[in-house]
């Protein structure tokens, strides 16, 4: 199973809400602040027309911008062999 990477900005309520929901619903994930991964932040900007939108989630080869926890779980389940 591919672990989703949740890119977020500190203080962003949307990123916080998603990370809490993923934790409460036991969806494995890893949280990454934009400033801690410049290469990842550049990829987020590339898929979001130059913007660092928080949260943006990378699962396998898919990028999800401001998804719900259900969308993340669904993306994880479709990438599981």
Image (cartoon, helix red, strand yellow):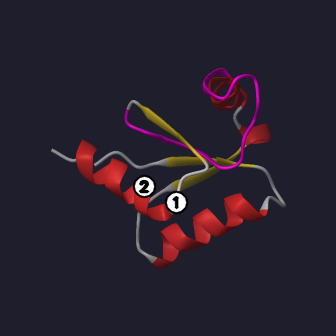
Q: Nearer the viewer, residue 33 or 47?
A: 47
Q: Who's the residue at 35% across and 48% down the image?
A: 75
Q: Give the percent coordinates (x, y) of residue 22.
A: 50, 67
Q: Main secondary structure of the magenta part?
A: loop
Residue on which the image places disc 2: 71
Q: Residues within 10 Å of mark 1 (few under 14, many from 20)?
A: some
Looking at the rendering, the stretch of residues picked out in magenta corresponds to 46-60
Which residue is at 52% across, 60% downward? 68
Question: Residue reaching furthest left?
Answer: 81
Q: Which disc, if any, is residue 68?
A: 1
Q: Is residue 22 shown left or right of residue 41?
A: left
Q: Residue furthest bottom?
A: 24
Callout 2 environment at 10 Å: few (<14), some (14 to 19), or many (20+)?
few
x, y (%) of residue 64?
52, 42
Q: Who's the residue at 64% across and 30% down the image?
A: 44
Give x and y (percent) for residue 6. 58, 49
13 versus 31 height, above or below? below
CB contact under 8 Å: marks 1 and 2: yes
SS category of the residue bearing label 2: helix
């Amino acid at each position: 199973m591919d672990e989703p990477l949740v890119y977020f900005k500190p203080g962003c309520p949307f990123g916080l809400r998603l990370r809490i929901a993923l934790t409460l619903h036991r969806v494995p994930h890893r949280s990454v602040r934009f400033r801690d991964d410049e290469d990842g932040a550049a990829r987020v900007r590339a898929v979001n027309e130059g913007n660092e939108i928080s949260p943006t989630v990378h699962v396998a080869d898919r990028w999800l911008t401001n998804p719900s926890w259900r969308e993340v779980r669904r993306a994880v389940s479709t990438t599981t062999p």
